[in-house]
Amino acid sequence: AILAEKKGAQRVLATDIEDFIVDNARSNVRHNACVNIRVDKADLTEMKPGEYGLILANINLNTLTQNLSVIRSLAAEGADIVLSGFYNTDAHGLIMQSESDGMRLVHKKTHDNWSALRFKYSASH
């Protein structure tokens, strides 16, 4: 969220379901003098579908795969969706699941045993 604002985002929403993570994120936002970031405790299913031009989901593989359709539903047409927090060996299956849900892989980055994937979302596939 902080990097998004520093790169020019005018409205940033950061969420988590854990109180201590939300509190820590709010502290980091204040510490970095960010003014365009709202940090909420929220479940993905409580968020408005089709609203977001960039989605960053840094969560474990099981949570990603169980919630991938919900994550995708939050994306506006043409949105970037970045998924991270899983092992390189799990990337192929996540790519296949994501592409079957209307996302197109545009970049894959690995570091040690970890992967990050960037997709573009299009409702028309």
Image (spheres, grey):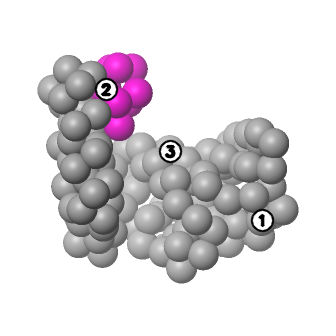
Kindly state the secondary structure of the residue where label 2 is placed.
helix
Quarter of the picture containing the N terminus is top left
- Asked if the residue at tag 3 contacts the one at tag 2, i.e. Cβ–Cβ closer than 8 Å, the answer is no
Task: Name the amino acid, label 3.
Answer: Asp
- First in sequence, mark 2 or 1: give its number: 2
Task: Name the amino acid, label 2.
Answer: Glu
Mark 2 highlights which residue?
A: 5
The residue located at (54%, 79%) in the rendering is 66
Q: Which mark is residue 99?
A: none
Q: Is residue 10 magenta?
A: yes
Mark 3 highlights which residue?
A: 80
- Whether 90 is drawn above or below 14: the answer is below
Mark 1 highlights which residue?
A: 90
Kindly state the secondary structure of the residue where label 1 is placed.
helix
Kindly state the secondary structure of the residue where label 3 is placed.
strand
Residue farthest toward the bottom in the current orientation of the protein: 66
Distance between mark 2 and mark 3 Cα atoms: 16 Å
Q: Position of residue 65 (x, y in %)?
A: 59, 74
Snapshot quadrant of residue 4: top left
Report whether 12 appears left or right of 85: left
Q: Is residue 9 magenta?
A: yes
Q: Provide the residue span drawn in magenta.
A: 1-11
Residue 13 visible in the snapshot: no
Q: Position of residue 82 (x, y in %)?
A: 55, 48
Task: Name the amino acid, label 1.
Answer: Asp
Quarter of the picture containing the C terminus is bottom right
Distance between mark 2 and mark 1 Cα atoms: 30 Å
